[in-house]
Image (tube, rainbow, N blue to C red):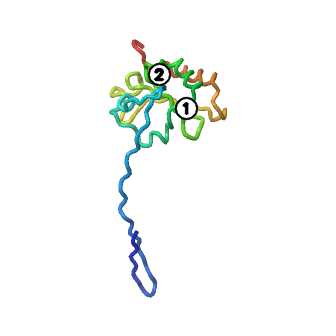
Amino acid sequence: MEKETTVIGGVEVGEIKVAAVKPTKTEKVVLKNTAGEDVKVGDYFFNGKPPVAFNQSCGLPVNREDLLDIFNKIFDPKYDFLFYKNIDKELYIVIIPLKHSISVGAQNDSIDGDFQKHALSFLSEGSVNPDTMRMKLRRILPFAKFGDN
């Protein structure tokens, strides 16, 4: 930074010039299925463009084996539903691939970056309860399409 000063009536008046800020690199979105394999961004986000700060808002893939077992019993891993946990809260996110989504697509007037997600909060409980997790995950099933539904 530079500072330009001028003296007016014995008082120094200054103006700080700020150097131009270079745009920061776009954050690399971490997208992994429950097996820990990378998946394609275009399979989850409308027009293949993830929202800005996706990882800050949705967190990272769940890595607790007990929760992954519950999740995979409800959502067959072959469908590649994603299971994420917020970084600093007991908040879990289920992300549905576009091909199984009932609320995101051109027919829904979606905008770039839209994706179908469902949040499961355990904020009031303080920690996740496996039975409650199972119940909350089952509630999502009607909001995804499989085959003929």
> Residue sitting at 47 percent across and 21 percent down?
143
> Residue sitting at 43 percent across and 79 percent down?
13
Q: Which residue is mark 1?
A: 92
The amino acid type found where label 2 is placed reads Phe
Image spot of residue 65 (x, y percent): 57, 26
Nearer mark to the viewer, of 1 and 2:
1
Left or right: 105 as drawn, with respect to 11: left
Q: CA distance from mark 1 to mark 2?
A: 17 Å
Q: Which residue is mark 2?
A: 143
Task: State the SS at label 1.
Answer: strand
Residue 145 lies, with reference to residue 59, above or below; the image says above
> Residue sitting at 45 percent across and 30 percent down?
32
Closer to the camera in the image, 9 or 130: 130
Closer to the camera in the image, 57 or 35: 35
Task: State the SS at label 2.
Answer: helix
The amino acid type found where label 1 is placed reads Tyr
Q: Quadrant of residue 21?
A: bottom left
Left or right: 109 as drawn, with respect to 89: left
